[in-house]
Image (cartoon, grey):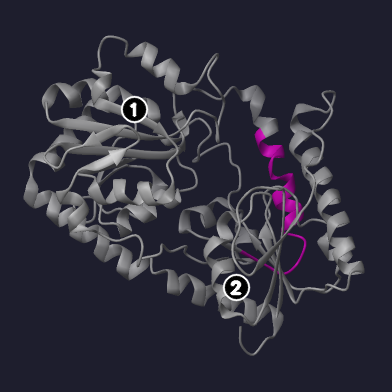
């Protein structure tokens, strides 16, 4: 088959699927994306230029739609070139979030379309207004509602949508859910797995070394920001570090903003460090930025307690990989996390807004070896039951056959 994938940041959510298809060596796999350095053997990446930003005079509520229309036009131009060169896909698979797919049915009428439906923006029961420390002004509600313009256009393109969690599925309107298939995302259980040897040896993180007798608390996010609870995590540090002299903390993530608003100045890390000035022994806290994947996995394998916090928003891959690696997860008691973590069985759940309670629960897991062993075993068992990557790939293949009419993939 001929596959066309589309995502502005290759390979995006399609990493495992495109690897799987390429490894079969019987498919032609093209991927339209903005240029980056990522590569996968057997996958031909076709770059498209980043479209210009909407002009400053564009109404604030219309900027996402303006940006999506520009991106849709740019992607369709690149697609038309591919068509002129003789390429017509048997199926198009992409992410609906940025408008990239909107004009492709005009380039290839009738070609089946499978779109990733990640999130439908809402004013209530979601990320908006969740954190009272950062309230959303009512004047911003029209802009938030208007962000769904791309979602609504995408839902009219035909084909099928797919989304990875029940909670994400529930954010869409009732009438849209029947068009969106729930396809859980798994983790690579052969790579993301417990390793007793790593737990018994020293771990190098940059220039620092975590000794085998030290207790290690880990936290991972793409960027260190309130959406992923970095303020609660860092405010837990004084209590954690006072409680145990043998405790080290590694906080992984960049200093940008992936979700939500930036701080008034600098980064959220800088803002919170200024707040904690004099209250934390920073020699025991590492901020390595973003890690290469091999080091990140070793960090999870070595972790004694892994903290995962999030607003009611899209759950990170790192949560799935932490469970698969057998981490003792302490997660926020929010809807996306509750879908993965059952309190006392494969992790602990704590209030997103209670740094002292978070610290106390982390210390309980570290100090109660029986509890920690049970949680780690429960995490891995949960992953083996629910996060097997093979099941994800089987689900994709079933959807591809359904849409394309192919007898096999």
Label 1 Cα neighbours within 10 Å, binned few <14 / some 14-19 / many ≥20: many
Q: Residue at (32%, 59%) from the top-left corner?
A: 324
- Asked if residue 149 is among those painted magenta in the image, a careful observer would answer yes
Q: Residue at (75%, 67%) from the top-left corner?
A: 158
Q: Is 142 located above or below residue 266 in the figure?
A: below
Q: Which residues are magenta?
A: 144-161
Q: Which residue is mark 1?
A: 232
Total labels: the figure holds 2
On the image, the x and y values in percent for residue 49 come to 80, 45
Residue 85 visible: yes
Q: Earlier in the sequence, mark 1 or mark 2?
A: 2
Q: Quadrant of residue 105?
A: bottom right
Residue 309 visible: no
Q: Which residue is mark 2?
A: 22
Give the quadrant of the C terminus.
Answer: bottom right
Q: Residue at (32%, 10%) from the top-left corner?
A: 277
Q: Quadrant of residue 252?
A: top left
Q: Is 41 located above or below residue 354 in the figure?
A: below
Q: Is residue 127 left or right of residue 189?
A: right
Q: Residue at (61%, 80%) from the top-left corner?
A: 25
Helix, strand or loop for disc 1: helix
Which sits in the foreground, 390 or 103?
390
């Amino acid at each position: 088959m001929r596959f066309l994938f589309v995502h502005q940041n290759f390979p995006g959510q399609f990493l495992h699927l495109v690897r799987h298809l390429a490894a079969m060596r019987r498919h032609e796999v093209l991927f339209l994306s903005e240029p980056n350095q990522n590569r996968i053997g057997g996958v031909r990446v076709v770059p498209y230029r980043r479209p210009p930003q909407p002009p400053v005079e564009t109404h604030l509520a219309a900027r996402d739609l303006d940006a999506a229309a520009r991106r849709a036009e740019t992607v369709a131009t690149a697609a038309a070139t591919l068509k002129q060169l003789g390429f017509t896909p048997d199926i198009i698979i992409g992410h609906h979030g940025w408008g990239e797919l909107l004009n492709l049915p005009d380039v290839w009428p009738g070609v089946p379309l499978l779109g990733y439906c990640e999130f439908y923006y809402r004013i209530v029961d979601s990320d908006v207004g969740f954190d009272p420390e950062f309230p959303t002004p009512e004047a911003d509600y029209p802009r938030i509602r208007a962000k769904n313009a791309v979602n609504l256009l995408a839902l009219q393109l035909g084909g099928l949508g797919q989304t990875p969690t029940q909670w994400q599925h529930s954010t869409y309107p009732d009438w849209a859910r029947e068009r969106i298939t729930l396809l859980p995302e798994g983790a690579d259980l052969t790579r993301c797995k417990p390793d007793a040897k790593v737990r018994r040896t020293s771990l190098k993180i940059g220039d620092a070394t975590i000794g085998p007798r030290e207790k290690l608390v880990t936290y991972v996010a793409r960027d260190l920001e309130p959406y992923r609870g970095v303020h609660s995590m860092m405010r837990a540090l004084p209590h954690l570090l006072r409680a145990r002299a043998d405790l080290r903390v590694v906080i992984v993530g960049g200093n940008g903003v992936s979700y939500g608003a930036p701080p008034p100045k600098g980064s959220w890390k800088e803002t919170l460090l200024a707040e904690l000035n004099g209250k934390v022994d920073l020699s025991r806290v590492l901020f390595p930025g973003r890690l290469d994947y091999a080091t990140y996995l070793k960090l999870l394998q070595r972790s004694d307690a892994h903290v995962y916090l999030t607003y009611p928003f899209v759950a990170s891959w790192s949560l799935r990989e932490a469970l698969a690696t057998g981490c003792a997860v302490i997660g926020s008691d929010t809807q996306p996390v509750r879908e993965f973590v059952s309190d006392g069985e494969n992790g602990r759940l704590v209030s997103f807004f209670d740094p002292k309670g978070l610290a106390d629960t982390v210390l309980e897991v570290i100090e109660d070896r029986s509890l920690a062993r049970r949680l780690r075993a429960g995490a891995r068992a949960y992953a083996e039951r629910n996060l097997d990557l093979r099941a994800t790939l089987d689900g994709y293949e079933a959807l591809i056959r359904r849409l394309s009419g192919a007898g096999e993939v």
